[in-house]
Amino acid sequence: MESVIVAIDGPSGTGKSSTSKAVAAKLGLSYLDTGAQYRAITWWMISNGVDVSDAGAIAAVAAKPVIVSGTDPSRPTITVDGVDASGPIRTEEVTSRVSAVSAVPEVRALITELQRTIARGAEHGIVVEGRDIGTTVLPDADLKIFLTASPEARAARRSGELKGADVRATQEALVKRDAADSSRKTSPLAKADDAVEVDTTDLTLDQVIECVVTLVDERRSRDAAQVEASE
Ligand SMILES: Nc1ncnc2c1ncn2[C@@H]1O[C@H](COP(=O)(O)OP(=O)(O)O)[C@@H](O)[C@H]1O
Ligand SMILES: Nc1ccn([C@H]2C[C@H](O)[C@@H](COP(=O)(O)OP(=O)(O)O)O2)c(=O)n1
């Protein structure tokens, strides 16, 4: 089977991580959570006393942390300087600061390069999820998906995860982060022109997974037919 690269983008709570992991596991592909990488560098900045409202200060030290992502979809990992960061990157403190850190062009250049290296190294192909994968990181991806869902549905999903969190406050924080991620100058959250948009508001997670697996299969059949026709 030919290697395949799938880019899955969209705002927070649309189902990118759950869908990407499941699709990668079903199809025997690697999996990369690029949001976790931006969270990891944000955690490092906070832990090292860097003023995250100062883009210059962030840029000056952006190359220091060594971020390593494990790409097995059944057990994704992330370390910073050899330390497991999977817990600390999900704190409210990191979530509220990640948009500022990830808007710094030097940070994006370094992390984008890391993401391309990981994608190139994935033997059987990879599902990469984020905000700018289809537009900037992997513009030649074989399949691009853009997931959407209503702010209400996304907030309900997120507050279900953060046990006891207030849905309204969660929705406000989420909408604010989307606005910051969509309006930054460098590589904003955006749908690529050739991405397939899937509104997940009224779909179950299983339906979304099935939809993406079908799109990958269709893409592979189309490629196989083209190769046959050219032989
Ligand atoms: N289609 C769906 N219907 C209901 N819940 C979903 C759906 N997709 C994802 N979820 C749930 O919503 C939460 C956020 O999903 P996640 O995959 O982390 O989104 P994202 O990576 O886009 O932020 C998770 O708890 C997940 O199980
Ligand atoms: N390709 C990416 C992925 C994430 N980011 C930034 C912007 C996002 O608000 C943060 C966190 O992303 P993450 O996917 O972990 O966020 P959620 O799981 O959707 O809450 O990272 C980015 O700028 N570019």
Image (cartoon, rainbow, N blue to C red):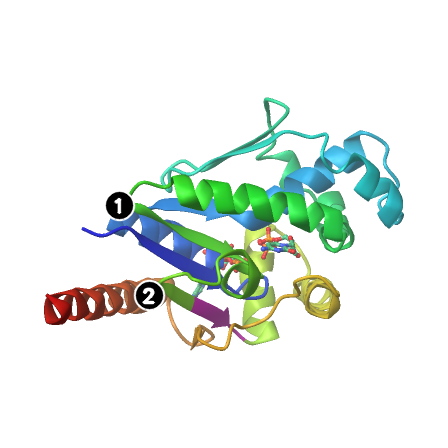
Would residue 73 be found to the left or right of residue 165 on screen? left
Task: Please say whether residue 199 is visible from this viewpoint.
Answer: no
Instruction: Kindly identify which residue carries mark 2.
Output: 212
Query: What residue is pinned by disc 1?
Result: 28
Identify the residue at image location x=69%, y=63%.
Answer: 181
Could you say where residue 120 lies in the image, as x and y percent from the top left? Answer: 41, 44
Dot 2, crowdedness within 10 Å: few (<14), some or many (≥20)?
many
Based on the displayed image, in which of its 4 quarters is residue 179 positioned?
bottom right
User: Can you tell which quarter of the image residue 168 is in?
Assistant: bottom right
Relative to 31, is 185 above or below?
below
Q: Nearer the viewer, residue 56 or 213?
A: 56
Is 172 or 109 nearer to us in this picture? 109
Question: For the magenta stretch, what is the residue range?
Answer: 145-149
Q: Is residue 91 above or below residue 47?
A: below
Magenta region, mostly helix, strand or loop?
A: strand
What kind of element bears circle 2? helix
